[in-house]
Image (cartoon, rainbow, N blue to C red):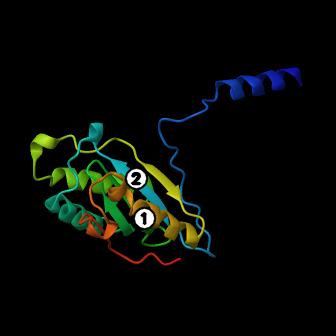
Amino acid sequence: MALSKNLFSMVVSSTPTSRKTPIHLHPNESSASPVIVFVTVCTHQKKRILAQHDIHGLLKMTWERASHWIVGRYVIMPDHIHLFCSPAAKKSSDLAAWISFWKSQAARQWPRPDEHPIWQRSCWDTQLRRGESYQRKWEYVVQNPVRAGLCSRAEEWAFQGELCSLAW
């Protein structure tokens, strides 16, 4: 008993209290509710290179081609992207693999090679648990450009949209 108690205290004391990188869990699929994941992807060293019309078009095209997951609502900020996505089928590819795929595709087609590298290695993702959390999270995310002083009203921000309706 003393040995297992010591082992437990060593594990607990060596566990960090905060993370600098996310833990990417596989989405919890339940037949009763859809899977909607909130994702944040940042540029390498927070470079402010995303909020441009050509990049907006490139990202939309890349997301449409990366067909294992579908993109719902999204906001492109100068140095990061927030998006909501859902598996295209029950047996879709791993979320991290899908994100890596579209990041790679976008980087290969990037119109300004001097801006490479484009992306941070990792990203943040959170599976939403309820339909109201999707709406509430969207209401917060869509206000990011306003809070950042990039526009006075969310509707004015040109770098946002919805590719597919993700119904709860």
Asked if residue 94 can be seen in this view, the reply is no
- Residue occupying the point 50% across, 48% down: 24
Residue that carries the numbered disc 1 in the rendered image: 84
Image quarter for residue 101?
Answer: bottom left
Q: Is residue 129 left or right of residue 94?
A: right
Residue name at image x 36 percent, y 76 percent: 164
Point 32% across, 66% down: residue = 153
Residue 63 visible in the snapshot: yes
Q: Which residue lies furthest to the front in this view?
A: 152
Q: Which amino acid does label 2 sit on?
A: Thr
Q: Which amino acid does label 1 sit on?
A: Phe
The image position of residue 43, as x and y in percent, is: 28, 45
Considering the numbered disc 1 on the image, is that residue within a helix, a strand or a loop? Answer: strand
Q: Is mark 2 on a helix, strand or loop?
A: strand
Disc 1 crowd rating (10 Å Cα; few below 14, some 14-19, many 20+) is: many
Sequence-first tag of 1 and 2: 2
Residue neighbourhood size for the residue with mark 2, other residues' Cα within 10 Å, grouped as few (<14), some (14–19), many (≥20): some
The front one of 160 and 148 is 148
Above or below: residue 32 compared with residue 59: below
Q: Name the residue under label 2.
A: 40
Mark 1 to mark 2 CA distance (whole Å): 9 Å
